[in-house]
Image (cartoon, rainbow, N blue to C red):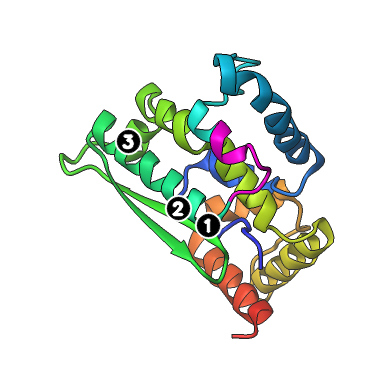
Amino acid sequence: MGARVGADLWLDRRMMLDRLGTRSPVVALAVLMVVVVVGCSAQDGAVGSPGSYLSPYQAAILQDGLVTFDEMDAAVHEYAACVGSATGVEVDVSFSMKSRAFSYLFVDPLGRDAESLVNSPEGEACSQEFKSFVELAWADQEGGSEIDDQTFYAAVADCMRIKGFNVQGSDAATLDYWIDQEPDAYEDCWNTVAFSESGS
């Protein structure tokens, strides 16, 4: 099974939306852009449109067009170390074999708002340096086909309806709403469908 929305409900909202769109044409275009940009930015650090900077670290990983588990694992741990150093937030990284997705738990030992610190310019710089494009490429690489995802999300929506929620449709906007409103029920349905798919 691929990396699908809801595998990690502790990710910030932006990453959740990115995962919802993992198999969309827009994301496929973004992954293609990474391959095109590699030739330029890996050599001269060129910066394209806002948010499209491809660091030398990520360019080296993406150069062969494949993100291995070891490369992705190294990238997320480099990111975690960077966030810790830049913001003081402790980052616990875990990997789910079921969803083939990495997840992050952010905790600030001083009691500050960890999410705000992670999403600060310092935290975002760590993402841009170590994992932004690599994580996107990994999710696209590990994800199922668009048809598979449509079937998967339809099953999650059906599960939510069985639980008594008035879920209308199974599109990205609808599911994003229910992730925000009923995260525990959504996570339970996501896991139910995922485990059923994997034969567990």
Q: Seen in the image, is 139 located left or right of residue 147? A: left
Q: Is residue 31 visible?
A: yes
Name the residue tied to disc 3. Answer: 83
Which sits earlier in the primary sequence, circle 2 or circle 3?
2
Residue type, numbered disc 3:
Val
Q: Nearer the viewer, mark 3 or mark 1?
A: 1
- The segment highlighted magenta reads 59-67
Label number found at residue 69: 1
Residue 3 is inside the magenta segment: no
Name the residue tied to disc 2. Answer: 73
Q: Is residue 176 visible?
A: no
Element assignment for label 1: helix
Residue type, numbered disc 1:
Phe
Q: CA distance from mark 2 to mark 3?
A: 15 Å
Residue 175: x, y in percent? 66, 54
Element assignment for label 3: helix
- Of residue 163 and residue 69, the one placed in the foreground of this image is 69
Considering the image in quadrants, where does the C terminus appear?
A: bottom right
Label 1 packing within 10 angstroms: few (<14), some (14-19), many (20+) = few
Label 2 packing within 10 angstroms: few (<14), some (14-19), many (20+) = some
Asked if the residue at tag 1 contacts the one at tag 2, i.e. Cβ–Cβ closer than 8 Å, the answer is yes
Residue 23: x, y in percent? 75, 49
Asked if the residue at tag 1 contacts the one at tag 3, i.e. Cβ–Cβ closer than 8 Å, the answer is no
Q: Seen in the image, is 56 located left or right of residue 85? A: right
